[in-house]
Image: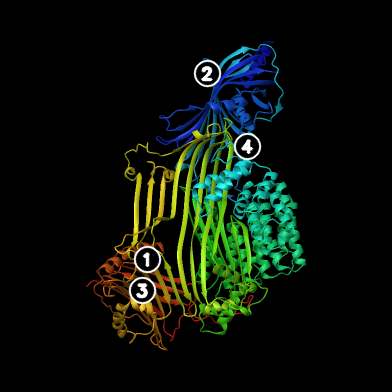
């Protein structure tokens, strides 16, 4: 019996402590204080925040159900400097929140766990989430059998891992419970990510640091009672550190605290009869109106339709002449309001503005940002009713689809565009519809796993149907759309078009094969091994087209192959006979071997091993072959980086690239964003140019291109001459082919009145006034999650662009064309125009609380404005090759480019919109500490480059204020006010300028001769020494400031050319024109074919006599000796300063160095042609010699013969880019002599 009693007592003791509980027959009163602040956690830096104070009363309804009643509520706001400012109560906001928050809420409470909540229907999700945050203090699991333990618990943040530590106070018998919740890695996390589907997570970057750190800790005092453990005091703290860079280098800090005190426990009086309530779910945070609330402004939306109409009117009026960058807030508010209205409201707005082109264009552009099913249905109605032009439809589809919230409903609605006849009314529109639909599927598949086949099935069916119809253009479009979708079920369809990888392969053109290979790019992320298997198979098929193999190699390395696979590729390349494939693959591996970005860390190690294997055989290949150029940079302190790639694809024996690709990536906030990729496919042009070079051995590459363009009428009818496509954020958004018909309708001299160019010319003759604007929300990224207080915390970035152009133009043509465009070549044309192009780009970053009633946080605002105004007239005659441009001088200060940036602590509430506060985070109150940066905390400077002759100056203005923690935290480099501007400003002159006149002609000009009589004497002296007599110039260009009847001032450039069988001579003269002006620059150059020697002499100063440089290049053995030139003191000092940097630069470029005694005051360079594809370089400065061997050349000097076979004709020898005679070693010798008298 004694044992039983002891066991029972122990059980009761443990039970009392294990299970904090509430007695349904008692009433519990608590005092609650919840605070959230957002700032930099540094003295003297502004912060903002909110505070909720109230009393809580909990009474029992049943054994496991309790009623929470909130009373004495106050809602306070903070905005200012901690320690100098204080929280201020907002009565109106308190009244609004209290209307819902003080209503009773029922909740389940069993064994220390809060269950489902019930509340009246009128209580909003936002207010009920605050209740969830308050009830979080009851959520605790106490075990006295263990002091330290961990378990998974459900709470307001989701289902998260909790770590407990328990201490017992032996005097009071109270337990002190510490609970740490890892809210970064929750299951069913109460968080929403928007706008980041196309930015791949970079886990390797997170190993070097992170841009967000989140943690929550609770401290409970639990008192033993007869009813169980009673929570008497709770202190909770939640921290979120955020930085656009690395949080280790400074951060924006969210600090949320909760304090709960037990006031008393009393017996309940009578039974509680709650009012009717609805079940509102468990303790996990529920998202509501905050998803539609843009965090940058807070407005009452009582009548959204009236406000939308008002805003459109204001925006159109403000931007009718030029872009007004002060109206950005209106555009954001317009986005906000349109997301609140119904489809019927959208139709009403459309019908209202249907006949007004300016209002209609703005409505179409902004309505695309509604981003849900309503805007898709709106576009479907437009397509069905034929309300849109092809141009409008193309832009609307591109913007809407690529910003659409992808889900099963919107995917099904987007399918309707694939079967609408209007979608096929234009090749560009049809291509845009397909590519955009593929992008929607890609984002949808990122949210569901597995992604249903039905989403991508229309594109797969289209590819099959295009093949059966032998429609290559449609087949390529469908493959590109399939590539955008990146659906795993599309692999089999793609493989059908790739030889050697599928038993059911079909025969298609090389163009289609290239598109099929590119369609694998997104699958490389979702099924790495499958893509590696396919691309490796393609790469190893030596009978395939070179470009298909190189494209496969590119995709293969995008999958980040392991060391074993890279080594296999290297081993295969040792036996590769196709030098185009070998060169491309080697250069790709070589570039990746030097990569610094985190995602390529393991791959770069593998590529370094491969380079050691391949370099002896392939390291000497020049730019005559295909190349992959990779450049990247990454900074661990800021966790940002960039990479750029240039891919040059050539066919065997081809000098002209068949494909050019340029790609850029950005690394930031732990993600990789493929910003833009541009591709030009020039296969036909490469083949045609190569054919011309084969026929005429002495033809230069430029001559071959010009000859090919001159024979455009013989080009094929259907084969694209140029194909171009662009990808933005990894998704292909544009694809177009340029064929013979397009060229003929645009530039053919025989084109007549049916040509669109003819209509354009007629309109300009009558005078045109054209205005265009384009608002574009480039990206909207949002990360919203719950906090312990029940208020959501948000990190968001908005990048908005508004571009506009206003053009007025008129032309006079004498005689006017009557039959064809070719008549313009013999006419005198006067073209007059004025206008401007302005582009405003605003970047907003917000970190703080964002709800439909209150906003509080840190907000950075960056505004960039590009402004290009113009006013000029052009007179020209194409036949006589004379052009004259007249423009007025700059009369007022004009900002060409400006950047303004600052960070603010913001507070807004819906009841007091006039009381909104934006306090600069670093303002005039700063009290700077004594430190090395204190003198540079406020920088203000202005630098101008003046052109007095033209009464114009280009100036750069800069002003910056910085916090005094620069050396400790890199984040503070961007904290504070920054302004930078480039301006054009007038310069005062004694004589006012009427106009600036620029004239270009290819021969003597009477007007030019009248202003350059002083040149004749100088020319007769100079040319008697070189050319013998004064020949006619081949080019004359003048830039003059004309002022009434006074002599013009400015500069004149004249080019003379004398050609002979043995020697070509060219002379360029630049002369200052004006009273007492004698400054000149003279360049004399000649190419002596007899002696294989070239010389150039550069002189400048007064009458070209002050400074002089000689450069010689010859194909001979090194010539000994040195020529001394006088009067070049300044130039000598410049070159001596340059010489100081040569050792460091040479070392960075991996040149070898030897310390030798070389001639004083002289820098010389010796370049030796080592092979047909490389050079040796040797440079001597007085105390050092640097040299490097086998530097690859971007071209080939000697004929190159190849036995490779590929598509297109082969070439037996290449063009001789440099005539070389004799069988001796060729040396290119360059002297630069810089000597003092």
Quadrant of res 1030:
bottom left
Disc 4 versus disc 1: distance between alpha carbons? Answer: 61 Å
Quadrant of res 397:
bottom right
Q: Which callout, 4 or 3, points at the residue further toward the start of the chain? A: 4
Please give the residue where the numbered disc 4 appears in the rendered image.
289
Q: Which callout, 1 or 3, points at the residue further toward the start of the chain? A: 1
Q: In the rendered view, tell whether residue 1066 sits above or below residue 834.
A: below
Disc 2 versus disc 3: distance between alpha carbons? Answer: 94 Å
Please give the residue where the numbered disc 3 appears in the rendered image.
1052
Q: Pointers 2 and 3 in contact (CB under 8 A)?
A: no
Residue 724 is left or right of residue 239, and the answer is: right
In what element is the residue under mark 2?
loop
Identify the disc placed on residue 994.
Answer: 1
Closer to us: 336 or 290: 336
Other residues around mark 4 within 10 Å, as few (<14) / some (14–19) / many (≥20): few
Q: Pointers 2 and 4 in contact (CB under 8 A)?
A: no
Disc 4 versus disc 3: distance between alpha carbons? Answer: 67 Å
Closer to us: 532 or 670: 670
Q: Which callout, 2 or 4, points at the residue further toward the start of the chain? A: 2
């Amino acid at each position: 019996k004694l044992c039983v009693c002891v066991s029972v007592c122990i059980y009761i003791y443990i039970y009392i402590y294990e299970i904090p509980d509430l007695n349904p027959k008692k009433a519990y009163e608590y005092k609650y204080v919840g605070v959230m602040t957002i700032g930099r956690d540094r003295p003297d830096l502004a912060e903002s925040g909110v505070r909720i104070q109230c009393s809580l009363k909990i009474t029992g309804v049943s054994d496991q159900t309790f009623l929470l009643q909130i009373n004495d509520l106050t809602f306070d706001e903070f905005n200012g400097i901690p320690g100098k400012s204080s929280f201020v109560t907002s009565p109106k906001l308190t009244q609004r929140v209290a209307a819902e928050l003080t209503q009773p809420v029922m909740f389940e409470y069993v064994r220390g766990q809060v269950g489902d909540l019930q509340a009246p229907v009128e209580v909003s999700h936002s207010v009920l989430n605050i209740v969830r945050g308050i009830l979080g203090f009851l959520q605790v699991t106490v075990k006295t059998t263990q002091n330290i333990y961990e378990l998974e618990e459900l709470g307001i943040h989701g289902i998260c891992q909790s770590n407990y530590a328990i201490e017992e106070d032996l005097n009071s018998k109270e337990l002190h419970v510490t609970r740490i919740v890892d809210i970064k890695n929750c299951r069913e996390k109460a968080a929403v990510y928007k706008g980041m589907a196309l930015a791949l997570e970079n886990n390797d970057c997170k190993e070097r640091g992170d841009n967000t750190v989140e943690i929550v800790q609770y401290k409970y005092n639990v008192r033993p009672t007869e009813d169980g453990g009673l929570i008497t005091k709770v202190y909770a703290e939640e921290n979120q550190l955020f930085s656009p860079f690395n949080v280790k280098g400074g951060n924006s800090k969210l600090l949320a605290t909760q304090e709960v005190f037990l006031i008393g426990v009393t017996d309940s009086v009578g039974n509680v009869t709650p009012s009717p309530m609805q079940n509102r779910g468990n303790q996990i945070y529920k998202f509501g109106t905050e998803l539609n609330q843009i965090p940058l402004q807070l407005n009452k939306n009582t009548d959204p339709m009236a406000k939308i109409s008002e805003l459109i009117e204001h925006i159109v009026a403000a931007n009718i002449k030029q872009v007004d960058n002060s109206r950005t807030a209106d555009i954001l508010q317009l986005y906000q309001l349109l997301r609140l209205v119904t489809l019927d409201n959208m139709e009403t707005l459309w019908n209202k503005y249907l006949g007004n082109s300016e209002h209609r264009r703005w409505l179409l552009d902004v309505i695309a940002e509604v981003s849900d099913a309503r805007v898709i249905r709106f576009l479907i109605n437009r397509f069905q009713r034929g309300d849109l032009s092809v141009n409008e439809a193309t832009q609307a589809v591109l913007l809407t689809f690529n910003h659409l919230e992808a889900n099963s409903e919107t995917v099904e609605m987007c399918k309707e565009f694939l079967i609408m006849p209007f979608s096929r009314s234009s090749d560009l529109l049809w291509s845009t519809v397909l590519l955009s639909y593929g992008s929607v599927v890609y984002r949808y598949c990122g949210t569901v796993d597995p992604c249903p086949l039905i989403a991508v099935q229309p594109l797969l069916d289209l590819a099959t149907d295009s093949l059966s119809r032998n429609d290559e253009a449609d087949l390529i479009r469908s493959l590109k759309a399939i590539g955008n979708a990146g659906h795993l079920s599309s692999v089999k369809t793609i493989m059908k078009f790739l030889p050697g990888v599928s038993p059911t392969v079909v025969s298609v053109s090389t163009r289609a094969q290239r598109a099929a290979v590119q369609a694998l790019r997104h699958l490389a992320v979702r099924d790495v091994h499958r893509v590696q298997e396919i691309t490796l198979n393609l790469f190893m098929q030596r009978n395939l087209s070179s470009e298909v193999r190189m494209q496969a190699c590119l995709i293969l390395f995008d999958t980040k192959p392991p060391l074993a696979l890279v080594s296999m590729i290297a081993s295969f390349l040792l036996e590769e006979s196709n030098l185009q494939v070998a060169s491309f693959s080697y250069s790709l591996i070589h570039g990746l071997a030097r990569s610094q970005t985190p995602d390529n860390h393991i791959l770069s190690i593998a590529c370094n091993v491969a380079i050691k294997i391949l370099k002896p055989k392939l390291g000497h290949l020049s730019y005559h072959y295909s190349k992959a150029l990779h450049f990247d940079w990454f900074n661990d302190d800021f966790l940002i980086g960039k990479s750029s790639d240039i891919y040059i694809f050539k066919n065997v024996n081809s000098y002209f690239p068949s494909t050019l690709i340029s790609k850029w990536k950005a690394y930031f906030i732990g993600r990789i964003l493929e910003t833009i990729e541009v591709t030009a496919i020039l296969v036909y042009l490469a083949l045609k140019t190569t054919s011309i070079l084969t026929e005429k051995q002495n033809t230069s590459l430029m001559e071959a291109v010009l000859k090919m363009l001159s024979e455009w009428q013989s080009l094929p009818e259907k084969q694209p001459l140029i194909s171009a496509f662009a990808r933005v954020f990894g998704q292909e958004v544009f694809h177009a082919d340029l064929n013979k018909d397009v060229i003929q309708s645009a530039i053919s001299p025989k084109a007549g009145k049916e040509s669109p160019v003819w209509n354009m010319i007629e309109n300009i003759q009558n005078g045109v006034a054209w205005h265009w604007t384009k608002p574009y929300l480039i990206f909207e990224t949002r990360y919203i999650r719950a906090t312990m207080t029940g208020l959501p915390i948000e990190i968001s970035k908005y990048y908005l662009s508004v571009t506009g152009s206003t053009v007025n133009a008129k032309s006079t043509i004498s005689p006017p064309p009557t039959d064809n465009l070719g008549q313009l070549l013999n006419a005198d044309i006067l073209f007059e125009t004025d206008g401007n192009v302005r582009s405003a780009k605003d970047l907003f970053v917000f970190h703080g609380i964002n709800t439909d009633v209150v906003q509080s946080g840190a907000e950075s605002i960056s505004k960039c404005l590009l402004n290009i105004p113009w006013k000029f007239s052009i007179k020209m005659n194409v036949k006589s090759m004379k052009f004259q441009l007249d423009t007025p001088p700059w009369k007022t200060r004009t900002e060409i480019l400006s950047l303004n940036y600052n960070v603010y602590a913001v507070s807004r509430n819906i009841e007091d919109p006039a009381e909104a506060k934006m306090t600069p985070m670093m303002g005039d109150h700063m009290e700077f500490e004594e430190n090395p940066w204190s003198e540079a905390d406020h920088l203000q400077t202005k630098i101008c480059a003046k052109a007095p002759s033209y009464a114009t100056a280009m100036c750069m203005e800069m002003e910056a204020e910085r916090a005094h923690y620069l050396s400790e935290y890199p984040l503070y480099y961007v904290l504070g006010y920054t302004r930078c501007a480039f301006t054009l400003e007038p310069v005062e002159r004694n004589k006012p300028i009427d106009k600036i006149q620029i004239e270009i002609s290819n021969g003597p000009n009477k007007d030019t001769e009248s202003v350059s009589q002083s040149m004749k004497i100088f020319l007769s002296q100079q040319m008697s020494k070189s050319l013998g007599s004064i020949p006619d110039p081949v080019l004359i260009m003048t830039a003059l400031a004309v002022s009434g009847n006074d002599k013009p001032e400015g500069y004149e450039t004249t080019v003379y050319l004398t050609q002979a069988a043995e020697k070509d001579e060219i002379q360029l003269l630049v002369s200052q024109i004006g009273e007492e002006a004698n400054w000149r620059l003279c360049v004399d150059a000649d190419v002596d074919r007899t002696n294989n020697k070239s010389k150039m002499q550069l002189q400048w100063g007064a009458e070209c006599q002050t400074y002089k440089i000689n450069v010689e290049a010859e194909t001979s053995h090194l010539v000994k000796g040195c020529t001394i030139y006088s009067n070049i003191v300044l130039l000598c000092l410049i070159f001596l300063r340059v010489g100081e940097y040569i050792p460091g630069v040479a070392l960075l470029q991996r040149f070898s160095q030897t310390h030798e005694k070389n001639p004083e005051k002289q820098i010389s360079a010796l370049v030796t042609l080592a092979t047909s594809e490389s050079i040796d370089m040797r440079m001597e400065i007085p105390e050092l010699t640097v040299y490097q061997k086998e530097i690859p050349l971007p071209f080939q000097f000697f004929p190159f013969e190849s036995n490779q076979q590929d598509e297109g004709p082969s070439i037996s020898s290449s063009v001789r880019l440099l005539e070389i005679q004799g069988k001796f070693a060729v040396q290119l010798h360059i002297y630069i002599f810089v000597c003092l008298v």
